[in-house]
Image (spheres, grey):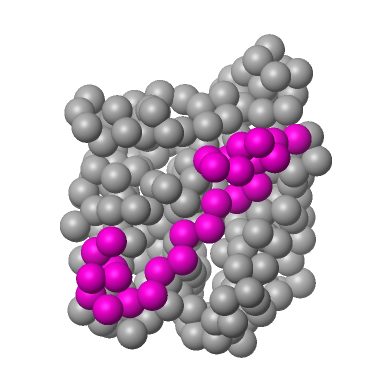
């Protein structure tokens, strides 16, 4: 049995993992799907005060509260920042990090600096015009490569605005990314998510990291949860 902690990405919430969590639990594993402050069912907490530090604390508090000691952390997209922060602070409680088509920051980095300038400028302007700089409105699932259909409709219905402060704040790490834990990076290839180009370049230069691919879109946990679950179980070595 493995303890999985699945951390969602921007505009999503713990709800997005439901199809994967169901399959992992059916295979005998424990699964935790926390929602970060200001998103999903916690959208009533949205404020200008939410930063990357808030998101890291969201995750480390779950690990503490559930008394996890050998967890596999899976960070999707923006959720990669939280698992990096947790690994920096409590590596003794973590077995492996799985960066799932994630944005990855080193110490002092901010998401705003890693996104392509046109992508970031569009998000900045949207935040200012729609919320006075509190949040970025949720995009269409098409931005993540999702095609029209039930998964598209489900995502469009559930996605919520994302706290703007998490894009502009900086991640504080005392150690290199991963903190010497086993790390896997999953790239979604059909299509490649353009906003992650700089991260993919960075990952290719990481000695010792396991690199995997899945031929689906950035939100494959919704479009093909069966395939994603199989890949995740293969990575951790458990059926």
Q: Quadrant of residue 129?
A: top right
Depicted 194 relative to depicted 233: above or below: above
Is residue 109 among what the camera can see? no
Q: Residue furthest top?
A: 129
Task: Provide residue 230's location: percent of width, then percent of height.
Answer: 21, 66
Residue occupying the point 34% across, 26% down: 142
Q: Is residue 166 magenta?
A: no
**Magenta region, residue range:** 22-47
Q: Quadrant of residue 104?
A: bottom right
Residue occupying the point 60% across, 43% down: 42
Task: Provide residue 212's location: percent of width, then percent of height.
Answer: 30, 63
Task: Provide residue 128's location: percent of width, then percent of height.
Answer: 72, 17
| 96 horizontally vs 214: left or right | right
Give whichever of 204, 29 is nearer the camera.
29
Quadrant where the image shows the N terminus: bottom left
Residue occupying the point 33% across, 61% down: 21
Q: Is residue 31 magenta?
A: yes
Residue occupying the point 49% across, 79% down: 71
| 109 horizontally vs 159: left or right | right
Task: Provide residue 28's location: percent of width, then percent of height.
Answer: 27, 79
Quadrant where the image shows the C terminus: bottom left
Counting the numbered discs, the total is 0
| 27 horizontally vs 84: left or right | left
Depicted 64 relative to depicted 216: above or below: below
């Amino acid at each position: 049995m493995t303890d999985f902690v699945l951390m969602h990405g921007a505009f999503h919430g713990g709800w997005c993992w439901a199809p994967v969590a169901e399959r992992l639990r059916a295979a005998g594993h424990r699964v935790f799907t926390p929602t970060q402050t200001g998103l999903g069912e916690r959208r009533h907490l949205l404020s200008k005060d939410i930063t990357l530090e808030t998101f890291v604390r969201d995750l480390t508090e779950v690990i503490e509260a559930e008394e996890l000691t050998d967890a596999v952390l899976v960070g999707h997209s923006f959720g990669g920042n939280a698992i990096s922060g947790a690994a920096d602070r409590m590596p003794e409680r973590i077995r492996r990090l799985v960066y799932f088509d994630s944005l990855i920051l080193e110490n002092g980095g901010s998401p705003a600096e890693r996104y392509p300038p046109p992508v970031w400028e569009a998000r900045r302007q949207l935040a200012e015009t729609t919320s006075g700089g509190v949040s970025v409105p949720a995009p269409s699932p098409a931005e993540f490569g999702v095609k029209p259909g039930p998964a598209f409709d489900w995502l469009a219905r559930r996605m919520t605005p994302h706290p703007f402060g998490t894009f502009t704040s900086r991640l504080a790490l005392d150690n290199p990314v991963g903190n010497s834990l086993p790390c896997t990076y999953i790239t979604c290839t059909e299509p490649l998510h353009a906003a992650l180009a700089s991260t993919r370049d960075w990952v290719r230069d990481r000695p010792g990291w396991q690199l995997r691919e899945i031929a689906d879109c950035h939100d494959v946990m919704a479009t093909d949860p069966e395939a994603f679950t199989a890949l995740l179980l293969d990575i951790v070595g458990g059926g």
